[in-house]
Amino acid sequence: MAVVYNPKAEPSLHRGAHIPNDVLTRLKKHRLGKPFHLVSAGYAESWQGHYTKRDALGEHIVIYCAAGKGFLETAHGTWDITPGMFLVCFAGKPHTYGADTATPWTIYWSHFSGTVSDEFITLAGLDERMPVITVSDHGAVTARFSEMLSLFTGDVSIAHTLHAGTMLSSIFTALACGRTPSAAFDMGSIVTYMQRRIRGNITLDECASLSGMSKYHFVRLFRKHTGYAPVDYFIRMKVQHSCVLLADVRKKIIDVARETGYDDQYYFSRVFTRIMGVSPRAYRKRLS
């Protein structure tokens, strides 16, 4: 697979998770995972300079543009991508995509595969000649992607990865019905707020006020959507972001701690170890 990308492209905020190879191998053999499963997923904000060109890839890619602009180019044409557009790059087919120079996009993305993955794409009305669709309910889609990412925060078990896959498949089936999933509780805006504060702190009062709910009602609905209390979810989001930063061996652990809002390196290490099961230093060694 030949691939060209811009190594200098840096989003202002990035969260990403890849399913470990051993879990992915088991998923491909699992009765529930073999038909449809995720390979990776992520979120990138204002991705200046983002550019990727591939001859082919072994799995499908979906990208949802939440803000800004970008483009998609395939053998069948070129599409300008704007907020609310959902696109598919087909497995085994050449494709090029990237951010607009003046207004770089903010995107949610996922790589997925499985024996029925093609059928989900077709069901949604997408094909190689028209791989782009506009979604009517932005909040609902961002909520699904946010839930998908939350399932990777500290746990990549078979059950969690299968459940994450249902978040994506539900978007495809909703598109097939001509609607997007209900989003009476706008999870997407809450998570976006948290993502913007990843280097600092938040309070429960702030989040409840943003949702327009009482603290009690907000916590109950947030836990129902994510399985975590809001502050615990935010801490896990910080740890997931620190995992991305730790992949850069040039960064000292104290710098990673500060970039995720922790002035005390040792406190950061304790929080990281509690959630990930290994220390930041051990996690970094595992990546090498």
Image: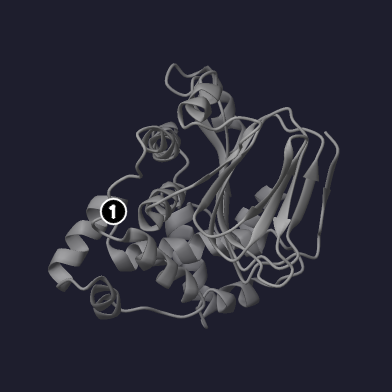
Tally the numbered discs: 1
Q: Is residue 68 left or right of residue 102?
A: left
The image position of residue 19, as x and y in percent, is 56, 39
The image position of residue 72, as x and y in percent, is 70, 48
- At 42% across and 32% down in the image, what residue appears? 162
The image position of residue 261, as x and y in percent, is 50, 78
Whether 6 is drawn above or below 113: the answer is: below
Q: Is residue 38 left or right of residue 271?
A: right
| Quarter of the rendering containing residue 95 | top right
Quarter of the image with the N terminus in it: top right
The image position of residue 267, as x and y in percent, is 47, 74
Q: Is residue 262 left or right of residue 181?
A: right
Q: Amino acid at mark 1?
A: Ala
Q: Is residue 242 visible?
A: yes
Residue at the bottom extreme, as displayed: 263
Categorize mark 1 by other alpha carbons within 10 Å: few (<14), some (14-19), many (20+).
Answer: some
Between residue 144 and residue 40, name the one nearer to us.
Answer: 144
Name the residue carrying label 1: 183
- At 23% across and 74% down in the image, what residue appears? 208
Whether 257 is drawn above or below 23: the answer is: below
Q: Is residue 43 left or right of residue 47?
A: left
Q: Secondary structure at mark 1?
A: loop
